[in-house]
Amino acid sequence: GQNIDQPTEMTATEGAIVQINCTYQTSGFNGLFWYQQHAGEAPTFLSYNVLDGLEEKGRFSSFLSRSKGYSYLLLKELQMKDSASYLCAVREAGYALNFGKGTSLLVTP
Amino acid sequence: GAGVSQSPSNKVTEKGKDVELRCDPISGHTALYWYRQRLGQGLEFLIYFQGNSAPDKSGLPSDRFSAERTGESVSTLTIQRTQQEDSAVYLCASSNDPQETQYFGPGTRLLVL
């Protein structure tokens, strides 16, 4: 079985930095993904971690610690358009992604 | 290039009716996946296709659910005798390889009355 936990909601201010945490307990591990999903739209791929450490991509960075079953997504220089749900997903083996319930981020002026 | 497309975007049906949902993957993507997203829940894996074969149907919630894929192209998810608990957004994704990133379509919002 699998258990993937992330906060339900977060609020942050435009221009600030926010960190969205994800912890997981899965029977296997073959990569962790972060997706962004605006209301009523398709999830869009943000980042992928399979080795420990930090992956940076523009304003977005993602960190993984396999020994701790922990990841975070870091969003810098927040913009209003960053208001969305952020989905953490673990691929245990093969192909299927196991998703957390998502974190709804609200960016305020 | 074109992304994953799904149709219809919205579907309202009566309990007991059958529905068919369609997915057009990104051209050339051999792997195709169906997920379900119920209100307030994370995405649930339903089924995976490699080419036109489905090596993993473990996520299908009941025998009312079935799916097929034509070659490395269109897939249809069929729900027979729909129930109210089937109401959800059904998302399709595709990838160039099972080990690569999955790209999602916009989903079909199904409401069973």
Image (spheres, helix red, strand yellow):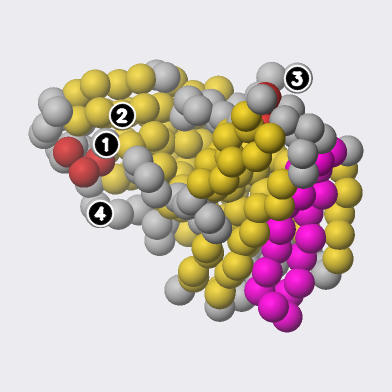
For the residue labelled by badge 4, is the local secondary structure a helix, a strand or a loop? loop
| Distance Cα–Cα, label 2 vs label 1 | 5 Å
Residue type of the residue flagged with mark 2: Leu
For the residue labelled by badge 1, is the local secondary structure a helix, a strand or a loop? loop
Q: Which residue is mark 1?
A: B87
Q: Nearer the viewer, mark 2 or mark 3?
A: 2
| Distance Cα–Cα, label 1 vs label 3 | 31 Å
Q: Residue at x 88, y 49 (%)?
A: A56
Dot 2 and dot 3 residues touching (CB under 8 Å): no
Extent of the magenta region? A59-76
- Percent position of residue A72, x then y: 71, 58
Q: Residue at x 33, y 37 (%)?
A: B88
Q: Which residue is mark 3?
A: B1
Residue B62 numbered tag: 4
Residue type of the residue flagged with mark 3: Gly
Q: Is residue B101 magenta?
A: no
Q: Nearer the viewer, mark 4 or mark 2?
A: 2
Q: Which residue is mark 2?
A: B110
Q: Residues within 10 Å of mark 4 (few under 14, many from 20)?
A: few
N-terminal of the pair, mark 4 or mark 2, is 4
N-terminal of the pair, mark 2 or mark 3, is 3
| Distance Cα–Cα, label 3 vs label 4 | 35 Å
